[in-house]
Image (spheres, grey):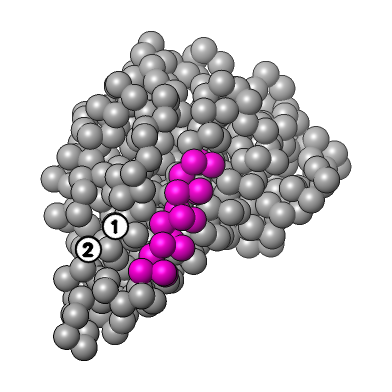
Amino acid sequence: MATNPAEVLGLPKPAWAADEVGMLYDMATRFMSEEIAPRYDEFEKNEMFDRESWLKAGAAGLLCASMPEKYGGSGGTFAHESAIIEAIGHVGVDGFGIGLHNSIVAPYILHYGSEEQKEKWLPKLATGELIGAIAMTEPGAGSDLQGVKTRAEKDGNHYKINGSKTFITNGQLANLIIVVTKTDPEKGAKGTSLIVVETDEVEGFERGRNLDKIGLKANDTSELFFNDVRVPTSNLLGHEEGKGFVQLMQQLPQERLQIGTGAIAMIERALALTIDYVKERKAFGKAIIDFQNTQFKLAELKTEATIGRVFYNDCVARHINGGLDPVTASMAKYWLSDLQGKVVDECLQLHGGYGYMNEYPIARMYRDARVQRIYGGTNEIMKLLIGRSL
């Protein structure tokens, strides 16, 4: 298989993937292949990574690549984050939660944090000393962020936070969590605020169980409980309360594009692995690739994967230039994750019975792909947002 599975499509690299971004992709691929892949079965069994892997990633420059150098980052753009996430997907260590840490958690602090907050938290996020998570989803509020019940009440120069969250990525390891709260429940969305909780420094914070998921076993996904958790009012993101919903809406396009990154990376890996497999596997005296049905199926998948990659590349270019609107980001999230599910399913079918065996990578991809259509806002919500633009 080619070092970069995307090469199976035969497309030229987009302008945003040239030079140092390409070099970062190569470096990230080596790191994931040498440091993470050999231990990935162990992480899957333990249902989480270890802190050592995060610290190694930080030392290798793979954390906070798009954060300014003055805050410990590499001074890159989302193109650099894309290179890292693609490397994770192409190597097949999809459960490493650094994509959320890098291009969701850190940007909230960069865009809305005070100078003091940025200087305090971003350098430690860049080294891996702090592992980031964002606590949006609640047992009674999934894609409906306006339905959040977690409450933050002022108590002198502190907030007292009460509530619970679920399905929180990096939830067992995270020690810096951006919590979506209601500071004024009477105001609905306008009463929503984002407050940072440093879990090593507070009382009343509890982690629930590491949730037993269908796939992405190596990534810890948890319930979180806040019982009179007191944090300084200076941990509020933004200059005033009630800006949380707007902040979430401004950052969700990048989160949804990042889901598209993982989707296209897995699509390309699944296709490359399957092409190799059908060339080697024989049935009825000839290679499976020699059957017309196989050729037609792979022709369809390669065509759709190529369309997906071209669309994705255009979205990244637009995002880097500040032009990725929420509707197009929703299209990327829904369409690419739907395509991911289709391609992986078809590729598993071409593996025959072996595709159902856990020792073959396509089986793990089949399990891991399913959640992509759910988190970051379900694909049904994406269609609703697109529909509103008509």
Residue drawn at x 30%, y 45% is 7
Residue type at the position of mark 1: Ala
Question: Is residue 86 something one can see in this rendering?
Answer: yes
Tell me if residue 24 comes above or below residue 136 in the rendering: above
Q: Position of residue 103 (x, y in %)?
A: 46, 34
| Residue position for label 1 | 272
Q: Residue furthest right?
A: 186
Q: Which residues are magenta?
A: 295-312
Q: Secondary structure at mark 2?
A: helix
- Camera-side residue of 81 and 270: 270
Residues marked 1 and 2 touching at CB (< 8 Å): yes
In the rendered image, residue 248 lying in the magenta stretch gets the answer: no
Q: Quadrant of residue 43?
A: bottom left
Tell me if residue 38 comes above or below residue 105 in the rendering: below
Residue drawn at x 25%, y 27% is 23
Question: Is residue 235 something one can see in this rendering?
Answer: no
Residue type at the position of mark 2: Asp
| Residue position for label 2 | 276
In the image, is 226 to the left or to the right of 355?
right
Q: Secondary structure at mark 1?
A: helix
Look at the image and tell me in which quarter the N terminus lies: bottom left
In the image, is 189 to the left or to the right of 75?
right
Number of other residues with Cα within 10 Å of mark 2, as a class: few under 14, some 14 to 19, many 20 or more: few
